[in-house]
Amino acid sequence: MRGNGINGHGTSTRDGDRIEFFGSQVGGKSVINYSYTDFPWKLVAYDIRTFFAFAWALPWIVWPVRPCDGDHFDELSFTAENIWCIFIHVILFVLQLLFLILLPLALVLPVYLFIAALAIFFLVNGLLCRCLNGKTTTYESDPKYAPALLEHQHEQWIFLNGVAVGEAWLKSNINRLALTFKRPVLGIHNRTTGIIFDVIECLIQRNFSYATSDIRLAYKVLKETLYNPQYSKVVFILHSQGGVEGGMVLDWLLQELPQDLLAKLEVYTFGNAANHFNNPHRHVQSQEEERKHPNARTEIPEVIANIPITDSPVEMKIPPPQKLPTNGWDNNCQDTDHPPPQVASIDDTKTLARRTYKVASSDRAIGYVEHYAHTTDFRASPEMPRFIGRVFSRFSSRGGHQFSQHYLNGMFPLSRNEDGELTGCADRNDFMESVIEVAKTGTEKADVREGFEKSWAMIGLAGDPDSVIPSEVALHGSFYGSLHGSLRGSIHSDDQDLFDGRVKVKHLSRLWQYRNGRSPPNIPHGLARGTTI
C-alpha cells in the first residue's frame, strides 16, 4: 500500500506512526470472481496463501505485550483472570496442535480406537473451554463504568468479540467500551473453542458462509433491537472474527429489514477479519453519480427550515406528521411505532434555514460504517475486493490485534485523574492527531473510492459552530451552508488545524465524536438520507 500526503504534508506522529485513509468503495455492477461469491475451496486456498504471505505478522497477534495502559482492561495485563485465561489457552493450543499433527494416524488405527480417541479429545477440549466461556451468551457492561442516562436511552450499543475471547475478556472489552463512550454496552459472546479451532471456524464462516450459533444469536439480537421503537440508533461494534460474523448478520438484515430500520444502524469494526462487507446504495442513480464524481455534491432545490445545531438527538421533538418533499412517505401512514421522518423542531435551540446539498455517499442502506486496522494485524486488510466502509489503516510499532490493549489503547486511550484512576477517553492522542494520507488503490484495482471530503465525520463536524471546519454546516450527509467555501476553505483565524489543508483522523472519525458521552450532530434520517438524488 502507498499513500500520498494531502497537499504534500507528512503524516508522522512523534512515534513515527502513519495513518492511511481509504474512502469507502462505491461498488457497482462488476462481478469480482475472487470475492466472497467465488467457489468456497478457491476462497480457502486464497486464505491459506494470504496466511503464509503475512506469516511475518503472526507475533503481532499478542505483540507488543507492554505497555498495558488500560490496566485491568488489557488482555495481557497481570491480573488473576488474565493469567488463568492465558494458561488455559496455552493448554488448548498444545492439545489442538497435537490433534492436527496426529490426525493422519486415523488411516491406520482401528475405527473403534479412532472414535474413542476423538471422544476423549473433544471431551477434554470442551471441559477446558467451559473454564473460559461461562454459562451465558449475552452480557451487560458494569453500570459503574457507564450508568444508563436519559440522554442516551434512545441508543443501544452492541459488541461482538473476536477469536479466543472467554467470559472474562468479553466483560473487560464491554466495560472498556462503556468507560470510553459513557454508554451501557451489550456484549454478544462469540464463544471460544481454543485459538486453533477458532481460526478454523473463522475460515469456514468466511469462505462457506456457514452461520454458527453465535451468528444466529447476534442476528436475533440485532433484528429485535432495530424493530424496538425505543431505539433510534443502534451502534454495532465488531472485532476480529466478530467482523466475519457481523458481516454475515448484516447480509441477512439487508435482505429482510425495511430501509428506515436499517438507517438506525451504525457499524464500527476493529481488526476486521471479514472477506467482504456490504452496504449498498438505496438508489442506482446515487451510485452512478458517486462513481462519476467521487467528491461531488448534488443540490436539492428545497430550503429546509428549523434544522437544529445540537449535539444530542434526544433534544429533538417530532412535530405532527406532515408530508415532506421527495422522501416517498405517505401522509396516511398509521404506523405509530415507526413514524415517517419529520422536520425536527427544538425548544431553546439555535435553528437555521439552510440550502441543502445531497452527498451521493449518504444514500446507503446502513447509516455509517467505519473500519480501524493495524497494518501489522494480518487478520485485517483494507484492500478486500468488496469492503464497503471507510478505513483508517495505521502503521505503528504498537499495532497488534488485541481489542483493548492494542486497538482501543492506541486509538481511544483512557485518561486518569489526580489519583491515577481511569476516568474516560482522553481528549487528545497521537492517533487522532495524526494527519491522514489518502491511500491509493490496491487489490481492488479500478473500483472507485469516495473522496475523503465526504467522510461522515467530516460532514458532521462541520455542523458544529465551534468546529475546525466552519466554512459549511453539514449534518448526516447533507450540507447546510452557503454555495461557497470548501472543507479546505476559509478557516477561523484562531484554528490552525486546517489552514494548510492538513486533515487529521479526528476530523474523519465519526466514532471519535461519541467519546465520553458526546454525540455527533444529528437530524432525522428522512431528511438527510431519504431524499432521492
Image: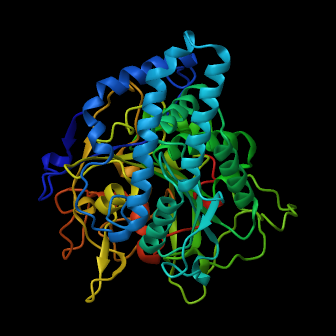
**Would residue 190 be visible to someone looking at this image?**
no
Task: Please say whether residue 454 is visible from this viewpoint.
Answer: yes
Looking at the image, residue 135 sits to the left or right of residue 463; the answer is right
Task: Where is residue 392? Give x, y as percent.
Answer: 34, 48
Residues 367 and 105: in front is 105
- Please determine whether, in this image, residue 25 is positioned above or below residue 530: above
Name the foreground residue: 198 vs 376. 198
In depth, the one of 212 and 483 nearer the eye is 212
Quadrant in the picture for the C terminus: top right
The residue lying at 53 percent from left, 28 percent from top is 28
Say left or right for 327 vs 186.
Answer: right
Residue farthest to the top? 108
What number of labels is visible? 0
- Of 432 and 143, nearer the camera is 143
Looking at the picture, does residue 519 appear above or below residue 87? below
Where is residue 438 drawn, in percent x and y? Answer: 27, 43
Give the residue displayed 61% in from the left and 20% down from the top.
114
Asked if residue 425 lies left or right of residue 339, the reply is left
Left or right position of 70 against 319: left
Q: Position of residue 276 (x, y in %)?
A: 51, 34
Q: Residue at x 64, y 27 (%)?
A: 116
Q: How is the image coloured?
A: rainbow
Q: Position of residue 226 (x, y in %)?
A: 70, 58
Q: Identify the residue at image location x=68%, y=68%.
A: 231
Quadrant of the image occupied by residue 195: top left
Q: Specify the quadrant that holds the N terminus.
A: top left
